[in-house]
Amino acid sequence: MNAESELFHAYREWRRLVQAEHKAIQTRNWDLLSDCHLAIKDFQVHVTGLTQEARAEWQRTGCNLAQKEAQLQVVVTELIDLTRQNQSLLQSTRLAARRQLDQLGTAGKNLKLLQRSYGFVPTAWSRAA
């Protein structure tokens, strides 16, 4: 496989990981999300080297560099867009979780106030929480 093929293969794999990230966020699979982040971090280093090799190959073989760079830019732009979508989805998921946590905290405080107003005596079962 030549450097260009390896580069675009690596970008396809990176895209697959970004799609897996999306699925992980949707399903709240935080272990998978973490694994994807680590794999993408490794791909960033790998792709940087492959990009340099591909560019050198393009110069050696006399390819139309502007055309090759444009093809590369399309792939990179798509990855950036997918990553931004994932960031947005993650941010909205975190916001929803924060709201739910706040609601649960408020409900807990209200329950304690209600219990106090009725002179509630805790039992072993009610202390399990």
Image: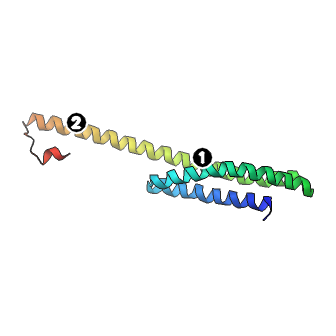
* In the displayed structure image, the side of residue 49 where residue 26 appears, left or right: left
Helix, strand or loop under label 1: helix
Q: Earlier in the sequence, mark 2 or mark 1?
A: 1
Where in the figure is residue 48, as x and y percent of width and height? 73, 48
Image location of residue 116, percent across then percent down: 11, 34
Tell me what residue is drawn at x 71 percent, y 61 percent: 9
Q: Residue at x 22, y 36 (%)?
A: 109
Q: Is residue 100 above or below residue 11?
A: above
For residue 95, what is the image quadrant?
Answer: top left
What separation in Å lies between label 2 and label 1 (alpha carbons)? 37 Å
Helix, strand or loop at disc 2?
A: helix
Are the two marked residues, 2 and 1, in contact with CB atoms closer than 8 angstroms? Answer: no
Residue type for callout 1: Arg
Residue 105 against residue 10 in the figure, above or below? above
Task: Give the residue pinned by disc 1.
Answer: 84
Residue picked out by circle 2: 109
Q: Position of residue 3 (x, y in %)?
A: 79, 58
The quarter of the picture where the C terminus appears is: top left
Residue reaching furthest right? 62
Closer-to-camera residue (77/129)? 129
Residue at x 74%, y 60% (from the top left corner): 6
Task: Look at label 2 and name its amino acid.
Answer: Lys
Local crowd at mark 2 within 10 Å, few (<14), some, or many (≥20)? Answer: few
Q: Is residue 39 left or right of residue 64?
A: left
Q: Residues within 10 Å of mark 1 (few under 14, many from 20)?
A: few
| Foreground residue among 72 and 62 | 62
